Image (tube, rainbow, N blue to C red):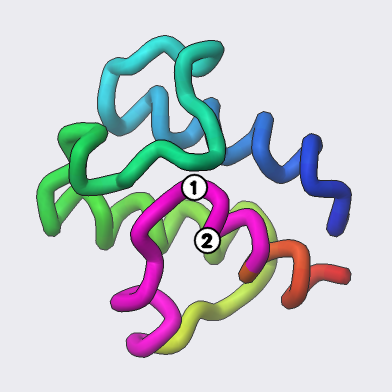
Amino acid sequence: MSDYNTINQQLSELVAAKTKLDANLIKPDLNLEASGLDSFARIELILVIEEKFGIELSDSESANIATIDDLIKIIAEKTG
């Protein structure tokens, strides 16, 4: 499950569901804060990601996530 494009597609769909953005417009360099995710929605997203990918993100990892690409790299590392 560590394929970059597969993870990117799945994350785009998850972020789209939380932000109401079109999944096709969500790119790896999208800043999560700029996407309209408030702090509560960001926590919800992290929880969904942890469940979907069967991983656990530490508080420091979660705090350092700024973009979709940051998430993809962490997920690929943890699932690879």
Q: Which mark is residue 25?
A: none
Magenta residues: mostly which secondary structure? helix
- For the residue pair 75 and 65, the one nearer the viewer reads as 65
CA–CA distance between discs 1 and 2?
A: 5 Å
Badge 1, how many Cα within 10 Å: few under 14, some, many 20+?
A: many
Residue type at tag 2: Asp
Return the x and y of residue 66 as percentages of the image width and height: 35, 59
**Residue shown at 68%/67% (left/top)?**
54
Residue 28's place in the image compared with 41, above or below, is above
**Residue shown at 52%/56% (left/top)?**
49
Return the x and y of residue 24 as percentages of the image width and height: 54, 12
Quadrant of the image occupied by residue 21: top left
Residue type at tag 1: Ile
- For the residue pair 66 and 20, the one nearer the viewer reads as 66
- For the residue pair 49 and 69, the one nearer the viewer reads as 69
Quadrant of the image occupied by residue 77: bottom right
Residue 76's place in the image compared with 24, above or below, is below
- For the residue pair 10 and 72, the one nearer the viewer reads as 72
Q: Is residue 63 left or right of residue 58?
A: left
Return the x and y of residue 62 as percentages of the image width and height: 37, 74
Residue of label 1: 68
**Residue shown at 53%/27% (left/top)?**
13
**Residue shown at 56%/51% (left/top)?**
69
Residue of label 2: 70
Disc 1 on helix, strand or loop?
helix
Residue 17's place in the image compared with 30, above or below, is above
Tell me, yes or no, whether the two marked residues, 1 and 2, touch with CB atoms within 8 Å. Answer: yes
Q: Which residues are magenta?
A: 59-73
Q: Quadrant of the N terminus?
A: bottom right
